[in-house]
Image: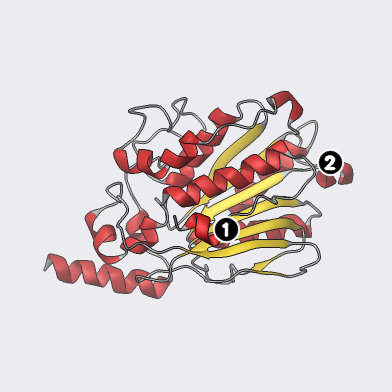
Amino acid sequence: MLLTAAMYLVSLSSALGQTSWLLEGTTAQHSGMSGTSICEEGAASSPLRDAFRQACLRKRPALPDSAIPETIIIGFVGGFVRRDNAKHPEVQFAGYLRNRYPSAIHAEVFSNHDGQKAFRQVLRLIARDHNGAPTATEKSRARIIIYGHSWGASETVSFATELGENDIPVLLTIQVDTIAKPGQSGSMIPSNVASAVNFYQPRGLLHGRSGIYAVDPARTKIIGNFRMTYEHPINCDNYPWYARTFNRPHHEIENDPRVWDQAASLIDAELSSPGSRADSSPSQSALLK
């Protein structure tokens, strides 16, 4: 009976295009309130420490925070995950970035259903007096990076598009195993985005879009569409057993240390070279080491 119920959940989630398995506990600290870095010993469960083991070893760029223009980094979690659910690497990544650049960035995570909340927050942050009504000059000077997993990756593209419709540029978008939400494609990168990267895996009930494309290749650099494989399983014990059983690859890429290391590398490149594109593009061979 339990197996039958689990299979019913699989069928239902597949029909919806995303799994409700991602609903998890609500005891985690708020994404903006935690003062503990994922890189500190004992800061999180073993799967999450494993997910960030390479990023935590990465040397921080020598440029001081005072020399880095203020940058807004917005993350979107997948499914119906709460924005404060610290079992998910997207939430931990924001904390990692805040600890890495304590005064140079504003990093915040949102539910993929809260794109409008994220949009209002960005307008508030880029307006000098924080009244939510930035001038044309303030919009043009905005420095924004967006990342997300699953439905959150789909929302990443939708959010970048909305910013573009309001004349707000985006430095970089990072998509991890994109599952398109109803009414979204998740694959066409708008021309206000300078650089974009896509990580995907092809297995399981839910698997990401294999390609992203620039609406205007002259204005947007597609860093790459990187296919991730998992012959050697990745620890996914931060997810329920039924997610690990029926949809494991979709969560393996979410916990993949190579993905978060490359995301950190690309963000480091943007922050350490203000005004330039993220040109330290990862190679396929480097990712699959």
**As shown in the figure, which amino acid type bears the numbered disc 1?**
Ser
Label 2 – label 1 distance at C-alpha: 35 Å
Relative vertical location of residue 280 with respect to residue 250 in this rendering, above or below: above
Numbered disc in front, either 2 or 1: 1
Q: Is residue 154 left or right of residue 270?
A: left
Quadrant placement of the N terminus: bottom left
**Whether residue 84 is visible:** no
**As shown in the figure, which amino acid type bears the numbered disc 2?**
Glu
Q: Position of residue 5 (x, y in %)?
A: 19, 68
Residue drawn at (40%, 44%), measured in percent from left and top? Answer: 51
Label placed on residue 69: none
Front in this rendered view, residue 190 or 217 = 217
Q: Secondary structure at mark 1?
A: loop
Residue drawn at (54%, 28%), measured in percent from left and top? Answer: 99
Most extreme residue toward the left, as rendered?
1
Which residue corresponds to mark 2?
138
Q: Are marks 2 and 1 in contact (CB under 8 Å)?
A: no
Front in this rendered view, residue 68 or 94 = 68
Label placed on residue 283: 1
Q: Position of residue 112 (x, y in %)?
A: 52, 55
Residue drawn at (49%, 56%), measured in percent from left and top? Answer: 287
Q: Secondary structure at mark 2?
A: helix
Q: Is residue 232 left or right of residue 187?
A: left
Front in this rendered view, residue 160 or 255 = 255
